[in-house]
Image (tube, rainbow, N blue to C red):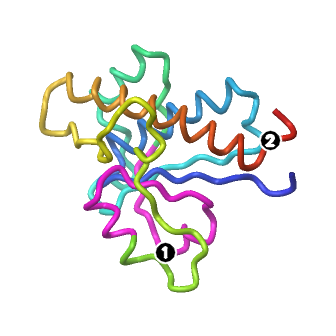
Amino acid sequence: MSKKISVLFVCMGNICRSPTAEAVFRHYVENAGLSEYILIDSAGTHDYHVGDAPDTRAQRSAQQRGYDMSKLRGRQVEAGDFRHFDYVLAMDRANMAILQHITPPDSTTQPQLFLKYARHHREREVPDPYFGGMDGFEQVLDMVEDAAQGLLEDIRQQYFRHRY
């Protein structure tokens, strides 16, 4: 395989949901021995937290499950991301609408809802835990872990069928 498969997770501010998804998916990819084949990043549709570390509550919840988010920093998604990423995955429909609006007309990458890959959650939107308590961050992790496993399996079937 000459080109890495690239995945971008997107939420509003890039400090809660999308960096959680980035950290969880990176962990799964590393454990699968596929780090050299899959590029992973996250971004926000808004510029509120560019350069900021993930929310401390998100980091605490993630750390308790063995995911490290400490080196991640917020950035804003841009139209050029659609040229660089094979998957642009929105956490909810509001951010999906923004992504659809900025997708270049000639882009082969189209945004999708991340939870389409979930196997055990019927919801299709990851709720924003920012204004709630710690239980919201735990719920986000549950949903993200489910969808990340499904996404990795989908990528394996599409790109690594003969290898792994």
> Could you tell whether 2 is left or right of 119 in the image?
right
Q: Residue at x 19, y 39 (%)?
A: 130
Query: Where residue 75 sits: x, y (%)?
Result: 42, 56
Query: Where residue 14 sits: x, y (%)?
Result: 36, 49
> What is the secondary structure assignment of the residue under circle 1?
loop
Quarter-of-image position of residue 113: bottom left
User: Which quadrant is home to the C terminus?
Assistant: top right
Quarter-of-image position of residue 108: bottom right
Query: Residue type at mark 2?
Result: Arg
Q: Which residue is mark 2?
A: 161
Q: Is residue 85 magenta?
A: yes
Query: Residue type at mark 1?
Result: Ala
Q: Nearer the viewer, residue 138 or 113?
A: 113
Q: Nearer the viewer, residue 19 or 153?
A: 153
Q: Which residues are magenta?
A: 73-99
Task: Tell me how far mark 1 sits from mark 2, CA to CA.
Answer: 31 Å
Query: Where residue 93 sits: x, y (%)?
Result: 28, 59
Q: Residue at x 55, y 73 (%)?
A: 80
In the displayed orientation, state which residue is furthest to the top: 64
Q: Is residue 56 magenta?
A: no
> What is the secondary structure assignment of the residue under circle 2?
loop
The image's mark for residue 79 is 1
Query: Where residue 161 sits: x, y (%)?
Result: 80, 41
Of pointers 1 and 2, the one earlier in the residue sequence: 1
Q: Nearer the viewer, residue 78 or 141?
A: 141
> Does 59 sit above or below residue 14?
above
Q: Residue at x 86, y 37 (%)?
A: 163
